[in-house]
Amino acid sequence: MADLTPTLCIVTALSVLCLPQAGAVEVHHTLIQAEVVQTYGELGEFMFQLDDDEIFYVHSPKKDVVWKLPDFQQFTSFEGQGALGNLALDKSNLGILKKSSNNTAAKNVAPEVLVFSEDTVEIGEPNVLICFMNRFFPPVINVTWLKNGQRVTEGVAETDFYPNDDFSFRKYLYLTFIPTQEDEYACSVDHWGQEATVNKFWDSNLSTPPSEVAANVLCGLGLAVGIVGIIAGTILCIKAVRLGNGAGRGL
């Protein structure tokens, strides 16, 4: 288990306004340079994201720039050594600010945890489990996959800490697996904001991301309302025709 020691964070954001041309729509983008200084690591985390999507991060020990999508390298570049220099400067500045200000410890906020599969589940077909941890602080968390109560280490991948607008963080943990009727999976999360380790079990009925589930529900409701509207409209039209015919005969 990782040593959960005090954590310092810096998150800088820059809002970019694209001025519209004639007839164009005004677009706002948010470019975030997140330098998360974690005292349990060497220096911390350096990453860039645009509109909540990660562009790249710098792997501190190797000084490598890791691109979320390799195609981004065709349009821009970044020198990993420069990130390490920025992190070191940020950490030094934070130390100065702490000494010169009457600071208090931030409140520990436990993560909201969701577990779902990437694709619709079919027994015996390869799939990916996703553990989504959101709105927690500080960005120090211990998370593992459990299969039938035993820790799983193969086929596991994770993201960096992504900053939210409210200065909290989010993170994803992935597990490639083959669904069966017998196996039980859980995402085990340990954070300062929790009194004890929380095991969030996977519900096979939740086989798509929550946003897609909500979209499907809304789509179904919209279709149902539309059908009801068509039926009601047809009935009213029939009644109107019958009333019109009756009035004509009365004349």
Image (tube, helix red, strand yellow):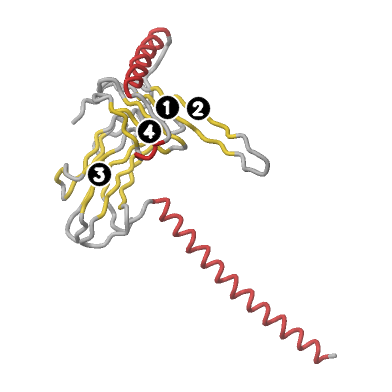
At mark 1, the secondary structure is strand
Residue located at (24% from left, 25% from top): 62
Earlier in the chain: of badge 4 and badge 3, it is 4
Disc 4 + disc 3, Cβ < 8 Å: no
> To which residue does mark 3 refer?
187
> To which residue does mark 1 refer?
33
Task: Give the amino acid type for the residue marked by disc 3 in the picture.
Answer: Cys
Mark 4 vs mark 3, CA separation in Å: 18 Å
> To which residue does mark 2 refer?
14
Earlier in the chain: of badge 1 and badge 3, it is 1
Give percent across and percent down for residue 35. 37, 24
At mark 4, the secondary structure is strand
Mark 1 vs mark 3, CA separation in Å: 29 Å
Residue located at (37% from left, 18% from top): 86
Earlier in the chain: of badge 4 and badge 2, it is 2
Disc 1 + disc 2, Cβ < 8 Å: yes
Nearest the viewer among 164 and 184 is: 164
Residue located at (38% from left, 14% from top): 94
At mark 3, the secondary structure is strand
